[in-house]
Image (tube, helix red, strand yellow):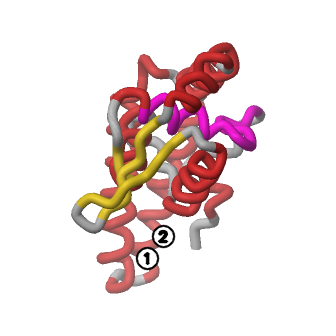
Amino acid sequence: MFHRRHFPFPPRQERMFHKGDFKYLILDLLKGKPSYGYEIIQALEGRFHGFYAPSAGVVYPTLQLLEELGYVTAYQQDAKKVYTITEEGKKFLSEQEEVAEEIKDRVHNWWNPESHAEIHGMMHELGELGYIMAHHSRKADAETLRKVRDIIHKAKGDIESILKQ
């Protein structure tokens, strides 16, 4: 079985986010337009080119904190809570511009942004391979599975050799 810590990438030396970073990212988004929580999650996923989507368990508590601090206000619209940055929130973001820019730079540099299309394509291919394995390997005999495992082992070695160049 795949373990999250081994798939798809090994842990990085530097964390992409530090405690409290999300408040800057969310305020920066809300500076552009009022949004509800799910829109914020989608917008952040877009900023990360689909490689990371913050969970509701991160976004909503951060929004609640920002509301308690007076940096955002919320109102109900069509059964959704819409968040808007306040003047106090804009002031805070302006005063912390250097911190906010450092976070944006760290997020931007966390992966090689010039290669994100290729990385995304590779992840898609790996997903399709996982689908094939999940749906067809249960019916395969031991000899067939050994051949597949040999192919995967060889491909892993070839990929590692190319990436270490």
Q: Amino acid at mark 1?
A: Glu
Q: Amino acid at mark 2?
A: Arg
Of the pair 82 and 157, the residue shown nearer to us: 82
Q: Position of residue 153 (x, y in %)?
A: 54, 53
Q: Is residue 164 visible?
A: no
Q: Quadrant of the N terminus?
A: bottom right
Looking at the rendering, the stretch of residues picked out in magenta corresponds to 14-30
Asked if the magenta segment contains residue 32, the reply would be: no
Q: Position of residue 86 (x, y in %)?
A: 49, 34
Q: Which residue is mark 1?
A: 143
Q: Along the horizontal axis of the image, is 141 left or right of 7?
A: left
Q: Which residue is mark 2?
A: 146
Q: Position of residue 131 (x, y in %)?
A: 33, 66
Q: How many numbered marks, from 0 up?
A: 2
Q: Quadrant of the C terminus?
A: top right
Residue at 36 percent of width and 37 percent of height: 46
Q: Is residue 137 above or below residue 99?
A: below
Q: Secondary structure at mark 2?
A: helix
Give the class, few, some or many, for how many residues have Cα within 10 Å of label 2's Cα (few <14, many ≥20): few
Q: Position of residue 36 (x, y in %)?
A: 36, 52
Is the residue under label 2 in contact with that under label 1 (CB below 8 Å)? yes
Residue at 59 percent of width and 22 percent of height: 91
Estimate the spatial distance between the alpha carbons at disc 1 and disc 2, rounded to whole Å: 5 Å
Asked if the magenta segment contains residue 17, the reply would be: yes
Give the class, few, some or many, for how many residues have Cα within 10 Å of label 1's Cα (few <14, many ≥20): few
Residue at 48 percent of width and 70 percent of height: 146
Residue at 35 percent of width and 81 percent of height: 140
Q: Secondary structure at mark 1?
A: helix
Image disc number at residue 34: none
Q: Is residue 141 visible?
A: yes
Q: Quadrant of residue 34?
A: top left
Residue situated furthest top in the rendering: 98
